[in-house]
Image: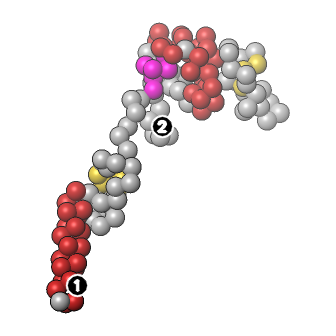
Amino acid sequence: MAVSEIPHMTYQQYRTARRLVHECCNYDCGNCLLLDDGEECVCPQSITYSLICKWFRAAVLPLDAGLCAALSPPPTVRRRRCRECGKPFVPPRHNTLYCSTCAAERARRSKRAWAKKNRADV
């Protein structure tokens, strides 16, 4: 999940997340042990409608499957940049390096070079 895509919760989701905050191993009487630098610091996840705590997202949120599914974005399709033209494309296989247009052009060039080489040998 990118930093710029911080999910925002509804009131009911916030209440559920607020109850889950108490399950966090870094939560101590309303304070966050990770942010404690000598002074007590209020747990930011307990006072916001956003999922801002990375630890909460990674370790605590999966404890509630329903809330996790509602707040997690659907899996994105992997995009790759074509090595020939640089345009983004969705590869049909994991080892595809070129978009369909550039792949066809490369195949034509390769076939032309092969034919030219074989004609020269005759």
Q: Regarding mark 2 in the picture, which secondary structure is present there?
A: loop
Q: In the image, what residue occupies the spot 57% across and 27% down?
A: 57
- 1 or 37, nearer to the observer: 1
The percent position of residue 79, horizontal first and vertical second, equals: 35, 48
Q: In the image, what residue occupies the spot 22% across and 67% down?
A: 107
Magenta highlight on residue 71: yes
In the image, is residue 41 above or below residue 118? Answer: above
The percent position of residue 67, horizontal first and vertical second, equals: 49, 16
| Contact check, label 2 and label 1, Cβ < 8 Å | no
By secondary structure, the bulk of the magenta-drawn segment is best described as helix
Q: Name the mark on residue 117.
A: 1
Q: Which residue is mark 2?
A: 1
The three-letter amino acid code for the residue at tag 1 is Lys
- The span shown in magenta is 67-72
Q: Quadrant of residue 48?
A: top right
In the image, is residue 110 above or below residue 61? Answer: below
Alpha carbon separation for disc pair 2 and 1: 50 Å
The three-letter amino acid code for the residue at tag 2 is Met
Q: In the image, what residue occupies the spot 39% across and 29% down?
A: 74
